[in-house]
Amino acid sequence: MTLTVLGLGAMGTALTRAWLAAGHHVTVWNRTPARAERLAAEGATVAATPAEAVAANRLVVTCLLDHASVVDVLDGTDLAGRDLVDLTTGTPAQARDRAEWAAGRGARYVDGGIMAVPPMIGVPDSGAYVFYSGSVDLFAEHERTLAVPAGAKWVGDDPGHAALHDVALLGGMTGLFAGVTHAFALVHGEKDIDTGEFATLLVDWLAACLPFTQRMAQRIVTGDYTSDVTSNLAMQVTANRTMVDTAVDQGVRPDLITPYLDLSARGVAEGQGAEDGARLIELLRR
Ligand code: FVH
């Protein structure tokens, strides 16, 4: 098993180490050579230029800072007959552009969205995985290699879909941590409330709420937002005032929660008060 890795930042280094540990022959290149030298001591072959690194192997993995750096690094390399897998975080549109760009240079292309931080890479049962999309033939041929550093989840032949899944999950996480940050701000410094004990309550509460995500999915798929609604939007909007008033009383800016509360109020104003909050995606997508 041989492959090339371009980009040896925190993530590229972790990926390369995982492949080396699994016995793969890895050719590496990095803009700052010192990072490649460290991996040479662990068995990697260091290429002097991106062109040399790309020429060394059919499977070429890029893990660079952003879209612009990928184009910078690959410009001037001969990609004809290469299988390019880009694990650099980007937008779906950038991934589709890169797929077209690679095809124009005779390469097959798969885009990847990494759902992990570097310490999780190459660690069995860490939960790390990567979304992949693009050329199904490329993926089928290299799946075993790609699955070495982290689990490999195929999400279809639209090259933008790996990035879309990645960014959508990051969006969910961002909203979650916005709520968590708000909750801690409300109680922090309050006499007789221990932050560590509060954290346990918060974790348990969020865990109890998370299964409702599946119920939301069912409502979104069926388009039926009315049946079996136990906490309709109108009730929530009334209760939301309590959340804002409490924040103000506690001297906490409600900025992290108001966008969602405002959207809920708009839903009620537009006649959706008796429906489930899942309906709000239709207001967002307008
Ligand atoms: N680290 C993480 O937690 C996240 C987890 C999820 C996925 N991301 C994405 O992975 C990409 C790489 O991230 P990284 O953590 O390896 O990032 P850095 O440690 O900052 O390394 C960046 C590498 O990119 C090289 N580079 C930057 N600009 C250029 C350029 N114009 N030309 C050539 N190379 C460039 C940089 O080289 P150097 O600074 O060592 O010379 C590093 O190799 C990223 O998309 C994350 O969003 C990681």
Image: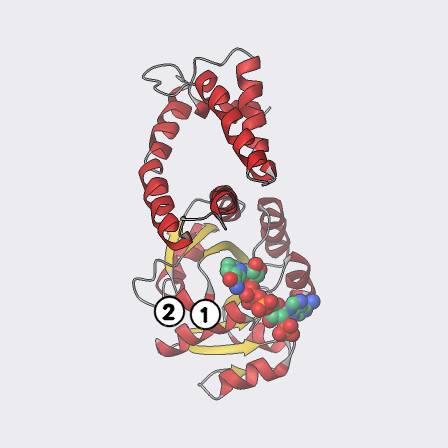
Residue flagged by tag 1: what amino acid is it? Leu
Image spot of residue 168 (x, y percent) = 50, 42
Label 2 crowd bin: few (<14), some (14–19), many (20+), radius 10 Å: many
Q: Establish if 109 lies above or below 93.
A: below
Q: Residue at x 59, y 47 (%)?
A: 91
Residue 259 - label: none
In what element is the residue under mark 2? loop
Image spot of residue 143 (x, y percent) = 37, 60
Q: How many marks?
A: 2
In what element is the residue under mark 1? helix
Q: Residue at x 35, y 63 (%)?
A: 144
Q: Quadrant of residue 48?
A: bottom right
Of label 1 and label 2, which has the lower sequence position? Answer: 1
Residue 239 at least partly seen: yes
Q: Nearer the viewer, residue 15 or 208?
A: 208
Return the residue found at the far front: 191
Q: Establish if 48 lies above or below 283.
A: below
Q: Residue at x 56, y 81 (%)?
A: 36
Q: Quadrant of residue 155?
A: top left
Image spot of residue 251 (x, y percent) = 59, 40
Query: Which residue is the site of mark 1?
Result: 15
Residue flagged by tag 2: what amino acid is it? Gly
Q: Is the distance from the Cβ of mark 2 to the nearest ligand 1 atom less than 8 Å?
A: no
Tell me how the rendering is colored.
secondary structure
Quarter of image, ligand 1 = bottom right
Residue 50 at least partly seen: no
Q: Nearer the viewer, residue 169 or 70?
A: 169
Image spot of residue 22 (x, y percent) = 34, 75
Query: Which residue is the site of mark 2?
Result: 122
